[in-house]
Structure formats: structure tokens, C-alpha cells
Image (cartoon, rainbow, N blue to C red):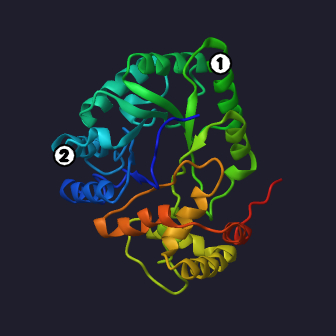
Amino acid sequence: MTALDFGPVVLGGNVFGWTVDKEEGFRVLDAFVDGGGRAIDTADVYVAWIPGNAGGESETIIGEWLASRGRRDDVVIATKVASLATRKGLSAANIEAAVEDSLRRLQTDRIDLYFAHRDDEGVPQEETLAAFDRLVRAGKVREIGASNFAPARLRSAAAIAQAEGLTPFTVAQDQWSLVERGMEVDLVPTLEELDVAEIPYSSLASGFLTGKYRPGTTTESARAGKAGGYLENPRNVDLLDVLDDVAADHGVSVTAVALAWLAAQRTVAAPIASARTPEQLGDLLEAGRVRLTPEDVAQLSAATEPVSG
């Protein structure tokens, strides 16, 4: 069980150094914390996919903001290891080197939540968990998490941690939204069994669940292609009508309803969502004030119910 308080929504840091520069990033971070936000998610690989970048750009912007504002104690910082080309995998040596890189870029002495960004089956889980445990015992990391892990690997990690007295994974991070619900079949029951909290990424499906992507419309965005692709499924188009109705009933945005649906799921501590401008934060933070009824949740869930098989 996690002891971390993630607030109403976790701010996704993958836009910093990509679609958001340092100056605008500072404005977004200021507005987020001033508006009641308490957690920021990033990774060492953010944003290495941009030509000319080496990775660590997001952590660097966040670190410069933390240092300039003196707000380290006001936020929960989550970052990740395993995906950056120059710090790849979950060997003990790589984890120990990568955490020092992240601490330096973030300009802090501890990381609140340190994720294995993806599984590494080439390294014994005993080695990986022991390395994470040493970081916790040294005070460099408060809790550890697992992102994109299969249920069986989460179970084996939990068994090893318990048998060897090591720090267990307390938080998971996986793709989950009203239009990406595959994890509900096997992964969610595993998280419940292990008492692991979930902070889902892509919770707005690349912007599709903001409601701005509609049949016959064109939207300028770095993620427009992926978001627009959801319109190819008639169930997702029908979902937009349900979202519109629930949002109107509560007098809130479609974005807030989509995030509130995730927050209503038993294993979810808080959804992750990003913002390119301070103005976009209003809808994200509004989700924390929305109280969906059981009927609202059931209606939304039924629109895109996953099929097990």
C-alpha cells in the first residue's frame, strides 16, 4: 500500500522539453501547484525521441522549477528508469547510475516514487528489487513502482520482496482510459490482490477524451493522429455522447468526467494527465471536484466495456 498522496490528478511531464519549453513549463507547474496539484510524473527518457535531445530534458525543466521556486516539499515527484538508451534495463548497476542522473537533473536529494519503466526479463528480479531496496534504505527513494508489467511478473516480484524482506512495488503505472480498458481483465485484479495502487497514463487517450475530436472535425495537435484514430471505433463515437450527457448533468467538462471515471476505479490513486498551457489545467484539476454517481460510472463503463476471452 502506498503512503503517497497524489492529489486529484498527477501532472504528466512528458510534454516538458517537447511541446512545452522551459518558460511555459514553469507557468504550467506554477499554476498546477497553485491550483491544488500535488504530484508530477516524469522519466529519464523524456523526451529523447525529439531530434537533438539526449533524454532527461523533462527532469531538467522540473528540477530547475523546483530549485527556483523552492517547492520541493510541496510535490510528489515520480520518475522512471529502464527506457533511456544510455541507461537501459533494470540491472543493479544501471539503476544505481540512473538514479544519480535523475537526482542531479531534478536538483533534489530524493525521489518520492521511482518506477521501473518497463520490465526487464533479462535481469533476475531479485537483483532489480535488491537495487531498488538499497535506494530506499539510503533515503534516495521513498517508494518504488512498476510500469507496464504483466500480472505474473508483478506477482513474482511481490513474492520475492516478501520472502527476502525487500521493498515491494506499491504503485503501478499502465495505459488505462475509457477507450483503453484491456488491463481490467487480468491486471486490475492482480493489483487489487497485491494492494498496489494504479496511476494510469494516457488517461485522456492522447486528447480524444477531452471531447475535442469529433467526426468531421480537424484538430491541430502533436497527437492528433492517434487521438483521431479512436473515431474509427463506433463504440468510442457513442461514448462521446455519454460523456457529453454526464458532463452536462454535473456542469463540468468532458475532460473532468473522463478523469473522474478513472479516479472512481477501486485501484486508482489518481490519473495522470498533461497540459501544454496553464489554461488547460482547469479541466484537469476540476476532475478532483467531480463526484460521479454509481449510475454515471456504470453508464460510462457500459459504453466501452472490455470483452474478456
Badge 1 crowding class, 10 Å Cα cut-off, few under 14, some 14 to 19, many 20 or more, is: few
As drawn, is 64 to the left or to the right of 48? left
Residue 182 drawn at (x, y percent): 69, 54
User: Measuring 25% from the left and 47% from the top, which residue is drawn there?
Assistant: 52
Calculate the distance from the C-alpha at mark 2 to the C-alpha at mark 1. 40 Å
Residue 211 drawn at (x, y percent): 51, 76
Badge 2 crowding class, 10 Å Cα cut-off, few under 14, some 14 to 19, many 20 or more, is: few
Query: 215 above or below 207?
Result: below
Circle 1 sits on which residue? 162
Q: Helix, strand, or loop for circle 2? A: helix
Circle 2 sits on which residue? 69
Residue 189 shows in the view: yes
Taking depth in this image into account, of 123 and 245 the one nearest to the observer is 245
User: Measuring 54% from the left and 51% from the top, which residue is drawn there?
Assistant: 200
Taking depth in this image into account, of 73 and 155 the one nearest to the observer is 73
User: Measuring 74% from the left and 64% from the top, which residue is drawn there?
Assistant: 305
